[in-house]
Image (cartoon, rainbow, N blue to C red):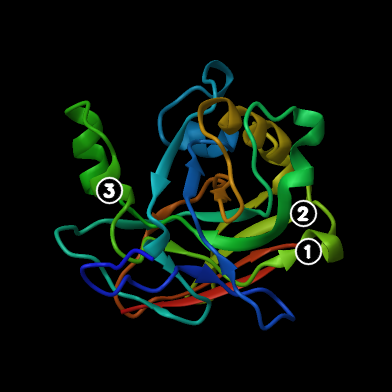
Amino acid sequence: MSAYVFTPPPQPAVAVLGRSELFPARRVYCIGRNYAAHAVEMGHDPDREPPFFFLKTPDALLPDGATFPYPPETSDVHHEIEMVVALERGGRDVAVADALDLVFGYGVGVDFTRRDLQAEAKKLQRPWEIGKAFDHAAPCGPLARAAEIGHPDRGAITLDVNGVRRQTGDLDQMIWKVPEMIAYLSRYFELAPGDLIFSGTPSGVGAVARGDRLEGRVEGVGALRLDVG
């Protein structure tokens, strides 16, 4: 048996509604500009762009009810409410028709972004990790099992900040639907159990400040509540 030079950190995991077992997280994929209105507000033409993805680290996951610590080296942190897709099976070159067979369930997540640092990286044509993959940047609420709720392809997705609606959209506004994004990802990566996919955000993204209270919801899936500390 192999020994480690130090004790490995705990396995990142997400709660599962109605279950004591946790969902162990392997990778966190995020699709960019997957709602047309959000693509427009970010200065892009959604009709001309193929899907693209970036990664966050599994240890950036933050549970429902937690405090999101305002990150360093930024003055412009934005919220992006998203439905999260959790995989219990993997594979390569998965057909669109078979993609939903890989799904364990769905959750509500927030893709926090250091927008000023992301903008600077874009300007310099550098990777986005400094703006996207920082500590605690991927809150995710408990997962609802697909066996119980099905595979939601329509329904309201919203985010309130201090009781005021900031973001609102519908899952049917996704440019690339869940089976399509799974199939597309599997062409470039071997997907595996434990993978999470943040599926994009509707329009209305904006800045958060210390002391803010966030509540995100996806109809038929669940909710996520956070305080900004």
Of the residues tagged 2 and 3, which is closer to the observer?
3
Residue 39 percent coordinates (x, y): 49, 33
Taking depth in this image into account, of 151 and 219 the one nearest to the observer is 151
Q: Secondary structure at mark 2?
A: loop
Q: Residue at x 29, y 76 (%)?
A: 210
Q: N-terminal of the two: label 1 or label 3? A: 3
Q: Is residue 32 visible?
A: yes
Residue 126 image offset from top left, x and y in percent: 21, 31
Residue type, mark 3 in image: Gly
Q: Which badge, 2 or 3, comes first in the chain's sequence?
A: 3
**Does the CB distance between marks 2 and 1 fall below 8 Å?**
yes
Please state which amino acid type lies under the numbered disc 2.
Gly
Residue at 39% x, 51% y: name it: 56
Residue 46, picture quadrant: top right
Q: CA distance from mark 2 to mark 3?
A: 29 Å
**Residue indicated by mark 2:** 155
